[in-house]
């Protein structure tokens, strides 16, 4: 019997939570071996012709996530930014709505979008406490991940991030997530600072690290954020520069054949 979404979170044996941006990318990733799919707020925003950081509404995020849930037969988790509101009760309602559409869990971060400033520490913890209480009251299992984004946004350091994830653990989070720590050494410090499963972001310099290296630090989950989507945008960017700048089309020569794509989408 396949592991439940919660059971997939095994420290030292991380699974890849593959962030998709539409039904096609979700189905393709599952066909290639993804055991779970996640939305990406940035990648979703890009599909709507919008920049990242707080440009997606809760209704839009729920509708998008529901499309992915319907497309695949593996657990789907929602990248739900700051819970779509400051108030703890808003975060709790977001959890309930996410469960209603079939999501296996969501992430809630501590950034007061659309800006970069983090919520004050006590409020950040209270938001997770309310969300965790809502998750525990659901009829089914639901994995709530608390994100401390201040290192990513340049608002606080690793020491503060450790204090934040420890407060989130106390508040009832099921797992924690600190994107983009300064180094693998810092990532190891963060993982050791909590008893909860830890999600690491595979993007930027961390894309050069192997699953085995993350496993050695005790990481339980590896998510891609918008990295895979941005890699796709890189293909469009490079092909476009060549087409419209040089009048050449060489970058299209390595396009996947229909015979490869079509079977993944059936």
Image (tube, rainbow, N blue to C red):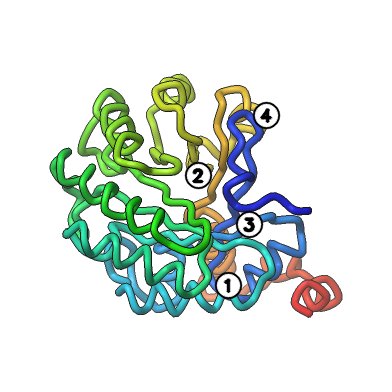
The residue sitting at 48% across, 75% down in the picture is 101
Quadrant of the image occupied by residue 259:
bottom right
Residue 25 badge: none
Residue 143 versus residue 57 in the image, above or below: above
Q: Which residue lies under the disc numbered 3? A: 36
Q: Earlier in the sequence, mark 1 or mark 2?
A: 1
Q: In the structure shown, which secondary structural element does the residue marked by tag 1 occupy?
A: helix
Residue 212 badge: 4
Q: Nearer the viewer, mark 4 or mark 1?
A: 1
Q: Nearer the viewer, mark 2 or mark 4?
A: 4
Q: In the structure shown, which secondary structural element does the residue marked by tag 2 occupy?
A: loop
Q: Earlier in the sequence, mark 2 or mark 3?
A: 3
Q: In the structure shown, which secondary structural element does the residue marked by tag 3 occupy?
A: strand
Q: Earlier in the sequence, mark 3 or mark 1?
A: 3
Q: Which residue lies under the disc numbered 1? A: 69
Q: Residues within 10 Å of mark 3 (few under 14, many from 20)?
A: many
Q: Which of the image's four quarters has the C terminus?
A: bottom right
């Amino acid at each position: 019997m396949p592991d439940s979404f919660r059971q997939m979170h095994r420290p030292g044996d991380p699974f890849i939570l593959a962030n998709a941006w539409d039904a096609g990318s979700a189905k393709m990733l599952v066909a290639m071996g993804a055991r779970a799919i996640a939305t990406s707020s940035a990648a979703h925003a890009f599909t709507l012709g919008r920049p990242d950081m707080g440009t997606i509404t809760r209704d839009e995020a729920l509708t998008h996530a529901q499309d992915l849930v319907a497309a695949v037969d593996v657990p789907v988790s929602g990248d739900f930014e700051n819970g779509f509101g400051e108030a703890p009760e808003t975060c709790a309602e977001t959890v309930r709505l996410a469960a209603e559409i079939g999501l296996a869990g969501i992430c809630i971060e501590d950034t007061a979008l659309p800006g970069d400033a983090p919520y004050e520490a006590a409020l950040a913890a209270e938001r997770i406490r309310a969300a965790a209480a809502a998750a525990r009251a659901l009829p089914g299992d639901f994995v709530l991940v608390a994100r401390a984004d201040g290192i990513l946004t340049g608002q606080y350091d690793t020491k503060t991030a450790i204090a934040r994830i420890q407060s989130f653990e106390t508040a009832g989070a099921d797992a924690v997530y600190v994107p983009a720590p300064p180094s693998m050494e810092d990532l190891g410090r963060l993982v050791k600072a909590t008893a909860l499963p830890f999600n690491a972001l595979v993007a930027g310099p961390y894309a050069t690290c192997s699953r085995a290296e993350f496993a050695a630090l005790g990481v339980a989950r590896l998510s891609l954020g918008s990295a895979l989507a941005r890699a796709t945008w890189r293909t469009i960017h490079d092909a476009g520069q060549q087409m419209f700048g040089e009048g050449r089309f060489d970058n299209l020569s390595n396009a996947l054949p229909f015979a490869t794509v079509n079977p993944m989408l059936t």
